[in-house]
Amino acid sequence: MSRIVMLYRAVLAAVASAGAVAGQAQDVSTQPERLSADVRTLASPAFEGRAPGTPGEEKTVAWLIAQLKAAGLEPGGADGSWTQPVPLIRTKVGQGEVVANDTPLAPGHDVYLSTVRPQSRLRVTKAPLVFVGYGVSAPERHWDDFKGADLRGKVAVFLINDPDFEAGSGDDAAGRFGGRRMTYYGRWTYKFEEAARRGAIGALIIHDTPGAGYGWATVTAPGGENYDVADPSMPRVAVQGWIEGSAANRLFAKAGLDLAAMRAAARRADFRPVPLKGTGLSVDLPVTVTRAQSRNVIAKRTGRSRPEETIIYGAHWDAYGQGLPDAEGRTVRPGANDDALGVAGVLAIARAAAKAPLMARTQVFALWTGEERGLLGSETYAAHPIYPLATTVANLTLDILQTAGPSHDVLLVGSGQNSLEDQLAAAAKAQGRIVTPEALPERGLFYRADHFSLARRGVPTLLLMAISGAPDLVDGGRVAGQRWLDAYMRCYHQTCDAWSPSWNLAGAAADVDLIRRVGFDLAAGHDWPTWRAQSEFAAVRAKSDADRTK
């Protein structure tokens, strides 16, 4: 074989690798330097931590729209605009008195409380406390913690996670909820919602770091601030929050109960709610209520031949804004990795899509608001979709990427859910990498990011989130990856989640390219990703089969 022929074949192979789908000759790898520059801007003090409904939002939204316009994309929001309105209620609880069974609880230390009701004062007087175990009502798993208990006017006290999180082989709960892999029943959002549905006036979750997946500092990070979608038809408890583990032990002991024994009892199918005898919970705290019109930022690249079929790339633009000063006097929580880096990744894909030849399907680039406050922006979109969910091919979400350099693997959250994972594995193989399932499924990360708003309505999803395990770094392996993860988790939702010139974003750029590859292949092709038979979302998607056939 001549040297010219060998060179020609090498060029063909390189072109095929860089553009696996038709018309991707202009496909260009994501540049780490551009990712870094975008994060440096979004996480700068000028953006004030990007809290919804603040001047920081105005600057953020304006900057994002300018980037999308400059890339040559089209407005993809409501009525031909660049945005989708997300009406929010913002509440902030002030200092005051919290007493449980005649024992004062120190806000921020023993208990963390907030509300999403638009009330000027958070006042509860001697509301009875009832321990409801894990607070799970799951008929399909033959599990009911409530047993018909009347919670009206009472405060439900929950354990975090699922009944089988700590279950042994002799417990009834063992294996019913996926072992240590958290289900939606284990999420704090589900527990608060279930308490409201049952008429409770309040809900308290007992914090423990293994079950929650994060420490007490993460619980208290919002500083009494909370957000909700302004929808009066949705029931909400008057007071919601967490009680620190040792404080919970003392509270149970004063009621004549052993919390460790109650945990064990809650893993039995015959568990019944247990009243915490005493004077109940009394709360008297001032509340500042403001209403805000926040916005999702949405752009699109309209498809050539099947524009009604859409692929959505997503990340959330919001962070935690400003809070109490840290040890160095910093008040801005810039959210550099969570999730300015994910936003930078979506912008990189959007710029590449704008330069590529027009593909068959429409590509949508969604930058959500209110993720940190309970997936509020993506939930608003999913409840009021601009593009029908039945013909949404997939949602591909970036939320926290690692900043420690190239890795041998990519971490996937929610492994075993749908066929998109096969496409991700193929794209990773082309990079000389493998897919590693999340190492900490008990954290319930699959239910904690914006993709979940669409997944629960049947849209197949992929989520890349670097805090799902230690990456296998090229320089230092998984040991070095664990060091990076441990260091980052100390800054999770804190003032130190800040841009750094020492970041090595080669690995993050490679992850962005994986999502771009999967998305571009879908945009150019005919595939409809499917949920695995065992997924809880398969039945929802099946109901829209007829719409897609049309």
Image (cartoon, helix red, strand yellow):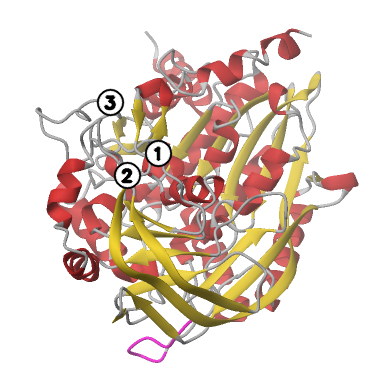
Magenta segment: 323-329
Query: Alpha-carbon neighbours of circle 3 within 10 Å: few (<14), some, or many (≥20)?
Result: some
**Where is residue 47 shown, x and y percent of the image?**
61, 75
Location of residue 511 in the rendering, given as x and y in whole percent from the top left corner: 43, 41
Q: What element carries label 3?
A: loop
Q: Is residue 328 magenta?
A: yes
Q: In which quarter of the image is residue 497?
A: bottom left
Q: Are marks 1 and 2 in contact (CB under 8 Å)?
A: yes
The quadrant holding residue 128 is bottom left
> Mark 3 touching mark 1, by CB under 8 A?
no
Residue sitting nearer the eye, 508 or 204:
204
Residue 434, given in percent of the width and then of the height, sits at: 30, 29
Is the residue 409 above or below the residue 142 in the image? below
Question: Observer-nearest residue: 103 or 494?
Answer: 103
Left or right of 56? Residue 467 is left
* Rendered location of residue 510, percent (x, y): 42, 42
Rounded to the nearest angstrom, the CA distance separating label 2 from label 3 is 13 Å
Residue 231 makes an appearance in the image:
yes
Q: Residue at x 63, y 65 (%)?
A: 117
Which mark, by number, is residue 134? 2
Identify the amino acid type marked 1: Tyr
Q: Residue at x 21, y 63 (%)?
A: 252
Please identify, in this view, whether the residue under mark 2 or under mark 3 is nearer the observer. Answer: 2
Label 1 element class: helix
Q: In this view, does 116 lie to the left or right of 161?
A: right
Question: Of circles 1 and 2, which is in front?
Answer: 2
Mark 2 closeness class: few <14, some 14–19, many ≥20 residues within 10 Å: many
Q: Distance between the residues labelled 3 and 1?
A: 12 Å
Give the residue number, with chain letter if any, for mark 1: 185
Q: Which amino acid does label 3 sit on?
A: Arg
Label 3 belongs to which residue? 176
